[in-house]
Amino acid sequence: MNKIKVNLGAGQKPIKGFVNCDIVPFKGIQKVFDINEKWDFKDNSVDYLECRMVFEHVQDIEHFLRELFRVLKVKGYFKITTINFSFWRYRLAFLFGKFAKQSCFHIDHCWLFKPSDLEAIFRQHCFRIKVGGKGLLPYPNLFYSYLEFDGYKCSGGKKT
């Protein structure tokens, strides 16, 4: 039995062995759709979902989480990375009004998250997550330039 693994927002970096999805039909993209609309997957069909540096571009977080809940199997696993608003350099840039085009304050970004906010949002939607990140030291609030969180869809109860 094949497990369905999804790379949501793959862009120009598709992953071999995954169903690579994006809004733009780049080379290697198997499914083209907007993540701000209904996702092109059946209910309870996805075993694993990966979403790198896309979550901050989502227009409606509630919709994203409803779709994630809908397509993941019970105990389906996901890994998401996003910009960490609490990173000290981003806070200084914000404070002094110096924003590089590549910074977390780029015009395309809709959301900025703190680790505690992410945990609360996902918990409310029947997911369990662990927040970590990539940076200098193991202190996610200050030293991770981006957050990496993984989790799974909880069993029991139905999320509406």
Image (cartoon, helix red, strand yellow):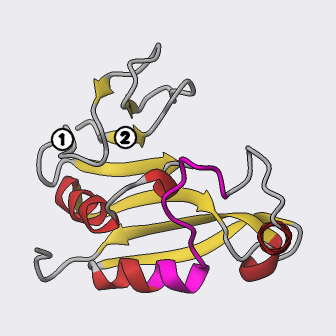
- Which disc is residue 138 wearing? none
Count the labels in the image.
2
Front-most of residues 47 and 99: 99
Q: Is the magenta stretch mostly helix, strand or loop?
A: loop
Residue 153 is covered by the magenta coloring: no
- Indicate the amino acid at tag 1: Phe
Q: Residue at x 60, y 78 (%)?
A: 114
> Does residue 150 sit above or below 81 in this rendering?
below
Picture residue at 47% right of the left edge, 49% below the top? 51
**Residue stretch in magenta:** 105-119
Point 15% across, 54% down: residue: 44
With 88 as the anchor, is 8 left or right in this view? Answer: left
> What x and y, as percent, mark residue 111?
51, 64
Left or right position of 32 against 55: left
Q: Is residue 156 left or right of residue 135?
A: left
Tell me the quarter of the picture where residue 31 sits.
top left
Question: Which image quadrant for residue 25?
Answer: top left
Secondary element at tag 1: loop
**Residue labelled with disc 2:** 6
**What residue does disc 1 label?**
41
